[in-house]
Image: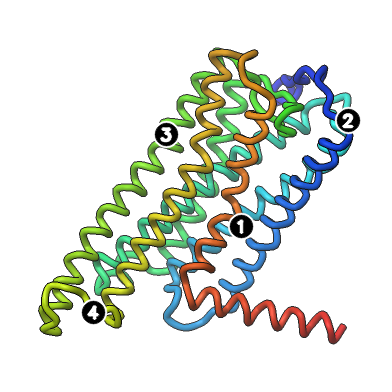
């Protein structure tokens, strides 16, 4: 393990930014980090406070786990603020960079796992509503969630210890990353195919399935209500299915837009280590990180219950602060 922690290098820092750009970059990273922390903290607070039938227990577990993993990403990004302000790696040792890279990879993988769990949960809830409480009770979802956290942690530790990739501080991206190399190419391809592509394909499949289910439900509702071939706008069943499809579509599109540039840049950089512009490295890394707060915006923008609970929690927080 000691050889793993010491197996890290500095990225060439010859190209120093102007002071104005350093200030703007640091301000952006600060705002991004605080946004991720605040929005996911709000999600956790809402999940702990919310009662009733929505969201179901299993959905609440998946959403809370997703918020915790995204919150962890925000906390790790806080460490990038002084690195950006100093515009260099300030330590003589590099093992903190290796730890930081490992934790961010771990949290990113867990976020993907949580997002898939939430998508599958919604698919079961919509496709088999009567069996849903039996197939995915809260305790079973909690077990699989804990299993996912533990399994992901063990996997990252084993991979980092066995492969011992060279980790460096990427001055352009303001992030600790594996050094571009042919050895890293295999790991990046596995990440792109197994984590990114697998997640996208599964979520697209769920989305297509939900489209089919919503069409079938709409036809059944129209037949029962004698409303003809078109859905009535005020029909709650048809509207609910449509909202679920739209919600999942937005999540899939957001996730793909956030992670596709990062995966592509990593693979291109492994094949052409000197061919990736600094600005592209920064944009691709921080675009992926920004996905950690996008989920909150999707939920609050497309779910009335979640939105009202957020407003209620925020009002109570403001009242508590005023009393103190």
Q: Are marks 1 and 2 in contact (CB under 8 Å)?
A: no
Q: Can you say which quadrant of the picture contains the C terminus?
A: bottom right
Left or right, 300 with respect to 86, comes to: left
| Local SS, label 2 | loop
Q: Earlier in the sequence, mark 4 or mark 2?
A: 2
Q: Which residue is mark 1?
A: 68
Dot 4: few (<14), some (14–19), or many (≥20) neighbours within 10 Å? Answer: some
Q: Earlier in the sequence, mark 3 or mark 4?
A: 3
Q: Position of residue 137 (x, y in %)?
A: 38, 69
Q: Which residue is mark 2?
A: 90
139 over 112 or under it: above or below: below
Left or right, 98 with respect to 163, comes to: right
Q: Residue at x 48, y 76 (%)?
A: 304
**Front residue of 206 and 152:** 206
| Local SS, label 1 | helix
| Local SS, label 4 | loop
Q: Earlier in the sequence, mark 3 or mark 1?
A: 1
Q: Which residue is mark 4?
A: 232
5 over 75 or under it: above or below: above
Q: Earlier in the sequence, mark 3 or mark 2?
A: 2
Q: Which residue is mark 3?
A: 194
Instruction: Give how far apart the Cα atoms at labels 1 and 2 are.
Output: 29 Å
Work out whether residue 120 can be spotted: yes
């Amino acid at each position: 393990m000691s050889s793993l922690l010491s197996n890290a290098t500095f990225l060439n820092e010859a190209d120093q930014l102007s002071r104005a750009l350093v200030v703007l970059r640091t301000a952006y990273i600060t705002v991004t980090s605080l946004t991720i922390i605040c929005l996911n903290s709000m999600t956790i607070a809402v999940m702990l406070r919310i009662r009733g039938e929505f969201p179901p227990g299993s959905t609440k577990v998946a959403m809370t786990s997703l918020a915790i993993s995204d919150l962890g990403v925000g906390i790790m990004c806080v460490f990038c603020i002084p690195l950006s302000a100093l515009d260099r790696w300030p330590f003589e040792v590099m093992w903190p960079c290796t730890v930081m890279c490992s934790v961010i990879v771990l949290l990113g993988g867990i976020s993907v796992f949580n997002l898939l769990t939430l998508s599958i949960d919604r698919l079961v809830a919509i496709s088999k509503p009567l069996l849903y409480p039996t197939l995915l009770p809260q305790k079973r979802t909690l077990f699989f969630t804990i299993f996912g956290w533990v399994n992901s942690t063990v996997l990252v530790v084993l991979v980092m210890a066995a492969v011992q990739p060279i980790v460096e501080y990427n001055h352009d991206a303001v992030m600790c990353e594996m050094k571009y190399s042919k050895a890293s190419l295999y790991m990046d391809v596995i990440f792109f195919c197994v984590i990114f592509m697998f997640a996208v394909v599964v979520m697209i499949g769920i989305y297509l399935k939900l489209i089919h289910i919503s069409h079938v439900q709409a036809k059944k509702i129209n037949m029962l209500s004698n409303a003809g071939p078109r859905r009535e706008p005020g029909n709650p069943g048809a509207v609910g299915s449509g909202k679920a499809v739209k919600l999942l579509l937005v999540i899939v599109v957001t996730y793909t837009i956030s992670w596709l540039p990062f995966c592509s840049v990593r693979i291109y950089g492994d094949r052409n280590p000197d061919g990736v512009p600094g600005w592209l490295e920064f944009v691709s890394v921080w675009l992926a990180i920004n996905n950690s707060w996008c989920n909150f915006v999707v939920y609050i923008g497309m779910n009335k219950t979640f939105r009202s609970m957020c407003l209620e929690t925020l009002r109570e927080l403001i009242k508590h602060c005023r009393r103190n």
